[in-house]
Every structure is written in structure tokens, then in C-alpha cells.
Image (cartoon, coloured by chain):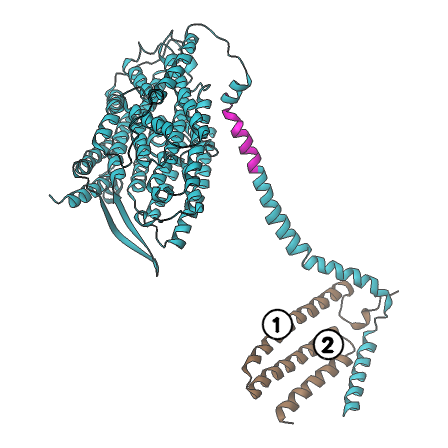
Amino acid sequence: MSLMHLSFYSAFTLSSLGLAFHRTHLISALLCLEGMMLSMYVALAMWPIQTQASSFTILPILMLTFSACEASTGLSLLVASTRTHGSDHLHNFNLLQC
Amino acid sequence: MDQPLVLNTFMLLTLATLLTPIILPLLSNNLKNTTTTITNTVKTSFLISLIPMAIHIHSGTESLISLWEWKFIMNFKIPISLKMDFYSLTFFPIALFVSWSILQFASWYMASDPYITKFFTYLLFFLIAMLILIISNNLFLLFIGWEGVGIMSFLLISWWQGRAEANTAALQAVLYNRAGDVGLILCMAWLASTMNTWEIHQIQLPNQTPTLPLLGLILAAAAKSAQFGLHPWLPAAMEGPTPVSALLHSSTMVVAGIFLLIRTHPLFNNNPTALSLCLCLGAISTLFAAMCALTQNDIKKIIAFSTSSQLGLMMVTIGLNLPQLAFLHISTHAFFKAMLFLCSGSIIHSLNGEQDIRKMGGLQKMLPTTTSCLTIGNLALMGMPFLAGFYSKDQIIESLNTSYLNTWALTLTLLATSFTAIYTLRMTLTVQTGFPRIPPLAPVNENNPAILAPITRLALGSITAGFLITSYILPTKTPPTTMPLSIKITAIVVTALGMALAMELSKMTQILIMPKQTPMSNFSSALGYFNPLIHRFSTTSLLGGGQKIASHLVDLSWYKLMGPEGLASLQLMATKAATSLHTGLIKAYLGAFALSILIMIVSTY
């Protein structure tokens, strides 16, 4: 596969592994999620250029819109957990479970 | 002599003369307006406007000039076009004559007012707006004049702004006129989309016009000319000073609605639905107003209701497909109605502000000229043969009796004619005859040329105007030439019956008759209970409905409850139910996720 394909496959995989194996803070998970979105954006933008199908050029913009919604949801969850628990440590999330 | 050129020049000169008191003070500090300059301006305009009317009477010259074109969008141009035909050429001198007399009277009536020059300027603005309305050939220019007279009416009714009733009355006038503007805009929109023009000489359809634009025009005329349903603003407008009542709400502004119907008459010609609607609406208005006038005790309100009744009669004439006769009635009505208001103003000032006819009496010896002219005006209003009102009113009643129309409308109109006789005779007898019921030290004085000259001038007009106009103008539609004797004398007989009934009322001035409260008399003196019913119920229901739809339904319900907040509460229900079902160990979950993805990729490789 070409160098471009290698770069965003590896970016996506590294970000998803980072999402799975963070241990301490919620915000690192959110940052990895953003990295995944970024690599997907670049991939979606390169695909219609390479295949010369101009109808699909709008797809990255659509994805960006939804990623913005999702990032804001993640940040609001972060703020909510910081307000109740004082920090965004992940071991707080099942603290009050009965 | 190049007649169209002279015609156009003198009409434009009339309008330019009226504009000088507005433009000249802006140019130099020394040229301030005074009451005499404005009165003399209107007098000069009147004299200049006699020349085009004379040219028209002599040779039937008409003209249509187009001054400037507003190129609105590509296919639709709005020219500022002025139409000088019989209607505008005849109405200009009449309106200017009446305005000149009223302005001369107002220089005495409002002499103690500190802002009298502003008052005169407002009256001048009103006059200019009214003349623009009359002379315009384009519905857009007519709308400008229409709105202009509405605004000036608002400013002039609330002249004594400190009075709460005056402000309420002015607001009432504006709101009811606004309701009519909706109709006019509906008609203009229909014309723009169907005929691509707003020019009056171009809006004609060979076959039947759809009823929708005509309904809009009838709504506009009903609001401006105080037909039944949109009438309460006219009696309430008597809160303004008497010159305002004389100019606006008797001769000029209220006839603007009827004038609109006269101008757009080619559209009405072949739509019998619209014509029947005009007929019935006019008949109801004239009877209702005459019924309300029977028990009024304020002299200005009696004259206001009689104006409303005559406007209903004009609407009936439009419904009979006789626009020229309606215009004749407008012209003769202007003279005697303005004179009635000026006489009442003279009486009111002489009695130091007393407007109740129960506290007037025996004024014939104290104010001879005023009361004689009051009698002449009342006789003209009743349709006394060969005074001004007779030429128009009798022709209308004859045409009513000899056409194929709704009997109910005919009955109502004849009944209203007899009521007219009753209340005018009641007013005349109570004000003028019998023993005086006024306080002893009243400043009764009419020896001022500022009062006597306008009133006698208008009296001369009330006597001769009908005769002069009908002698010089050829009718466009054939008037009925023969009819049985009983139909010919219907108007006179009905009026005489009314007068005979009213002679009983003359006893009221000598003997104290205790007023009885019967349901009919209560209905009449409460103006048909229309004001409290409509002004409370319709406004609360409209505003309440508006709040329900805009605020409760759209804002609170759809945008909040069924949208985000509803969604959030649903999610919360589901989460609370599911939260006890899982352990919440995120680290373990994500580690398992990564492991399973790895296994999937390896197994497919």
C-alpha cells in the first residue's frame, strides 16, 4: 500500500489503541478520539480526489460536523464529572455504584 | 388655448401653492407660518382650482399625466400618475372651499391655543394627503394619500393629548383604519400578480372579476368610511377639536373609502356578489347609525352619527352600480355637514364648552345667524326639496325604488331616511326653540367675521351646490325617467312622516318628560352594545389565541418539551433503569474492546 494509506491506517490504529489503553484521565481518551476523527477526515478527503468522483467531496465536511457534536458531548461529560468528583480520573466512575 | 396644457398647469399649480407653507419656512428663518398665511394659501388654491373645473365643465377636457416612474422590478413599474377627470376636477374646488371656510373658522375657535400654528400645519398636511388621494391614478400613490390621512387623523384627534379619552379615540381610529389597509393591500397584491399594474385606467376585466380583490376593496372602504362592523371610531373621533371633526370626519377623510370604490368601479361592474354586499352593508350601516343618533345627547355625536348614516347611504349607491350619484352625494354632503359642524362649534364656544343639547335651548334669539344656518343644514340633510341634499338624496331613493334589488336593503334605507328626519328635527328643536336651559352667564357672542363668513359661505353652498352641480354635469348612466307617483314621492313622504313623529319631541322643550328606559331606548343609547362586546371579546380572544399558538405551542411545546428537553428526560429514564445492570469498569471494557479488534484483524488475515 502507498505511503499515504500507511500513514492514516497507522494514525487510526495508534489512536484507537490509545483510546483503549489509557488508564488515568478521561481527557486522554477524548484526545485519542479526536485523533481518530482527524485521520478519518484526511482519509475521506483523499478518497474522492484519488478516484475523481466529485460527488463524494462533501463527505469530509459532513463527518466534521458530526465530530464537532461528538467532541462537545465528550467535553460536557468531562465537565460534568469534574464538577461532581473534583477531577476526571476514571476510577471515580464506578465509585458510587451499589 | 391648448386646453389639456392649461388644465394640467393649473392643477399642478394648485398642489404647488398648497406646498409653499411647508417648503418656504425651511428655506429662510424669516418666513415663518401664521394662521393667516395658511388660510390665504388655501383660499388661493381654491381660486386657482376653479379654472380647471371651469375648463372641464366647458369642454369636457380630461387628462392623465405621468410624472416619474419608479422602476421597481423588471416588469413592474410604478409611475406617479395623476388623473384629472370629472371626479378629481370637481372635488378639488369643493374640498378646498370647505377647507378654507374651516381654517377661517379655526382661527377663531382655536384662538386660545398656544400651538395654533402647528394645528394649522397639521390641517394643511391632511389636506395635501387627501388631495393626493383624490388626484392619484396609481393605487400606490393612492395608498400614500390613504395612509397620510390616517396619520393626520390620529395626530389631530389626539390634539388635546392630556385627555385620556382623546388618546383612546385616536388609537381606535388608527386600529380600525389599519384593518381596512389590509384589504387595500390584498387588492393591490392581487392586481400586481394578475394584471401587472396598479394604474386605475388599466384595471378592467371583460368578464366577471373574481370576488377576492373586491372583498379587499370593500373592507378598505368599510374601515375608512365607518360602515357597520368597523364603525366605532367615528363617534369616538369627536374627541378632537370641532375644526378637525368638520374637515376630517365629515367632508373629506371619511369619503376616501367611498372614493376608492368610485375610482375602481370598472372592477365592480360585472360582479353582482360584491355589489349586493355593498348594498346590504350600506343599508345596515345607515340604519344602525340613524338608530344610534336618536338617543344621543351630545350635539357633536348626533352630527357624527348622521355622517355615518350618510356614508352608509353612499355605500348603498355604490351597491346600485351608480358611482356618479355617490360622488354627487359626497359633494353636496361636504357642504352641509361641514356647516353643521361649524355651527355646533360656534354654539359650543358661545356656551363656554357645553355640548349637551339638554342644556341648550332658545338659542334662536341669541345666535340668529348660527341657528339659521343650522336649520338650513338640517333641512338640506333631510332632503328638503331643492336644497343641496335633495338633488343627490332624492335621486338615490328614486333609483333604489326603481331597481331590481334586495327588498330588505330598500326597507332599511327608507327607515333610516325617516330616522334622519327624526333626529335632525329633535336636534333643531331642542337646541334652538323653547325656553333657554343654559346657565345665565354664558359668553354668547357670534359677532365675529371669522365665524359668520365661513358659516354663511357654506350655507350658500348648501343651498346652491346641488343645483349647480347637476346643471353642469351630464349623467353617465340614464336616470329613471318615469315612475308611479307613489314611488316618486316616497322620499318626501317618509321624511314628512318622520317629522310628524318628531314633532312630539318638541314638547320636550316645554314640558319635563321623564325619559323611560325601555329595551329599545337602551339599545339605541348604548350604541347597540357593539363597543363593549367587540372591544373586549374580540381582543381577548385574538390575543389569547396568539399567545397559545406562538408562545405556548411553538416556543414551549415544540421547541423545548418535544425537542431537547423531552429527549433528555427519556434518556434519563432509560439510564436510571439500566445503571444497576452493569459494573462500570471502563478500563476493563476498553481493554476487552482492543483485544477483540486485534483478534478479528488477525483472524481475517
Q: Residue furthest top?
A: B511
Q: Is residue B411 visible?
A: yes
Report the chain holding disc 2: A
**Element carrying mark 2:** helix
Q: Residue furthest left?
A: B1
Identify the image quadrant of the C terminus of chain B: bottom right
Quarter of the image holding residue B88?
Answer: top left
A65 shown above or below B434: below
Chain colored cyan = B
Q: Residue furthest bottom?
A: A1
**Relative to the observer, which residue lies in front, A62 or B441?**
A62
Would you name the residue on which mark 2 appears? A29
Magenta region, residue range = B525-539
Q: Residues within 10 Å of mark 2 (few under 14, many from 20)?
A: many
Amino acid under disc 2: Ala
Q: Is residue B242 within the magenta segment?
A: no
How far apart marks 1 and 2 lie (CA) works out to 20 Å
